[in-house]
Amino acid sequence: MTSILLVAYFVILVAGYLLRALNLSHLKKYGAEVPSGFEGAVDGALLARTSAYTLEQSRVGLIQSVVHNLLLVVFLFGGLLGAYDQWIGSLGRSFLVSGILFFLGLSLAEMILDLPFSLYTTFGIENRYGFNTTTARLWLADLAKSTVIGLILLVMLSAGALAIVQVSPRWWWLWVWCLFAVVTLFLMYISPTLIEPLFNKYEPLKDEGLEREIRNLMAKCGLSVSKVLQVDASRRSRHSNAYFTGIGRVKRIVLYDTLLEQMNDPEILAVLAHEVGHWKKGHIWKRLFFMEALALVMLYAAFRLIGWGGLPGLLGLTQASFAVQAVIVAFLWSLLSFPFTPLNSWLSRKHEWQADDFACDLTGTPGALADALVKLSSGNLSNLHPHPLYARFYYSHPPVVERVRKLREVQSIPELRSVKGKH
C-alpha cells in the first residue's frame, strides 16, 4: 500500500508539472500578441515584460514546489515522520503538550523552508519589475507579527482540538469541527479591527466626493457599510486591489492607495460593484458553507480512519501517535482532492461571472469595469495568455481577456446587460 500511495503522489505531481509546462509553452508562443480589448493599453514592450515576469515567477515557484515535494516524500516515506514522532514522545510530555509540540515543530520547519523563496521573490523578482516598495526592516516586522499571530492561533487550535479528543473520544470529530467553525467566524469578525491594522494603516477615504458615490452605490443595492477606508498598500508593493472585509456591523470597504492612483472614479465604482455582487449573490456564505461542510466530512473521515488502526501501516510504520495519524489523513485528503480541483475552480469562475453581471446591472457601465480590468492586469503584469486547459484546472477567476471581451460586448449591445445565468 505504501508503494501505491507513493506512485499516486508522483502521478499527481507529474500531472501538475505538465500543466505548468503547457501553460508556459503557450505563453512563449502567444505572449507577444495584443489581446482583443487591450489595444492601446499594452504594447510589445509591456507584453515582453509581462511574459518575463510570469516566467520568472513560475521558475521560482517550480523550484519551491520541487524542494517542498521532495522533502515531503523523504519525510513521509523515508522514515523521518516516525523518527520525529518518537523524538516528540521521548520528551515525556502529556498527550496534549506532545501534540502541540508536534504541530509547532512542523509549522516552524515549513516557515523556515519558505523564507528563502519569500526573500528572493520580494527583494529579487518584485524589485526587478518595479513592484516591491518594502524595506528589509518592514519585511522583518511583518514576518515577526505574522509568525507570532500564526503560532498563537496554532497553539490555541491544536490545544483545543486535542483536549476535545481526550474528553470526547467518540464525538471529537463533531466538536472539533464546531471549534474550527466558531474560530473561523470569530476571526472574520475581529480581523478587520484587530489583526489587519497591525500590518497596515487604515484611514477614512480622503476623496469625499468618491466616498459619497460609493455610499450611494451601496444604498442602491441595499447595503450599508460602516467605513470606507484607504490603506497604505504602497508601503509594500505597487500591486493594487480593493475588497470588502468583515461581517455583521463591521463590514468595510478597503481601497488600496495604489488603486486610487491608477483608476478614475467610474472604474473604482465598477470594481466595488463587482465585489458587492459577491456579497449580494451570497457567494461568500455559499463558499463558507461549502468549506465547512467539506471540513466536517474530512473530520469524520479522520475519525473513522484513525479508529480503523491501519493508518500507520500505510507509511510503513508499526505505530504512530494521534498527531502523526492526523498528518497521514491530511496527506490522503490531498491526494483525493486533486481530481476535484477543476470543479472547485469552475464554481469560483462561475461566481466571478455572476459578480461581473451584477456590476454591469448596478452601475450600467460595463465599459468602466472592462477598463478597470485592463488597468489591473496590465499594471500587475498578469498573464494575458494562459493555456485554456491550465486556466480551467487552476484559475479561480476567468481569464481576464475573456472577461474584458464579454464586458465590451455588453457595452456595445445594452440588451445583453439584462441577460442572466449565461455562465
Image (spheres, helix red, strand yellow):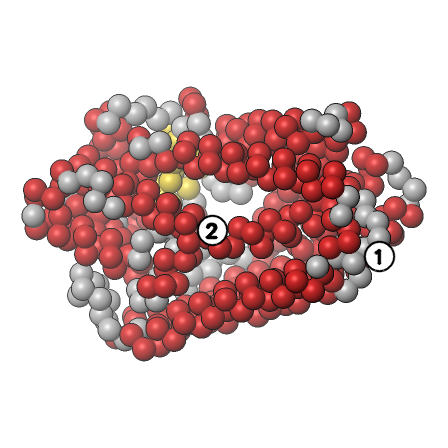
Q: Earlier in the sequence, mark 1 or mark 2?
A: 1
Residue at the spot of label 1:
83
Which residue is found at the position 56% from the left and 52% from the top? 336
Q: Which mark is residue 46?
A: none
In the rendering, at what x and y percent does residue 52 appear?
A: 40, 73
Can the viewer see residue 173 in this picture?
yes
The image quadrant that residue 117 belongs to is bottom right
Can the viewer see residue 323 in this picture?
no
- The amino acid sitting under disc 1 is Ala
Which circle, 1 or 2, is nearer the viewer?
A: 2
In the rendering, at what x and y percent does residue 139 appear?
A: 57, 54
Mark 1 is surrounded, within 10 Å at the Cα level, by few (under 14), some (14 to 19) or many (20 or more) other residues, namely: few
Q: Is residue 382 above or below residue 108?
A: below
Which residue is found at the position 53% from the left and 43% from the top? 199
Label 1 sits on a secondary structure element that is helix
Q: Which mark is residue 340?
A: 2
In the rendering, at what x and y percent does residue 134 appear?
A: 51, 56
39 displayed left or right of 110: left
The image quadrant that residue 249 belongs to is top left
Nearest to the observer: residue 116 or residue 199: 116
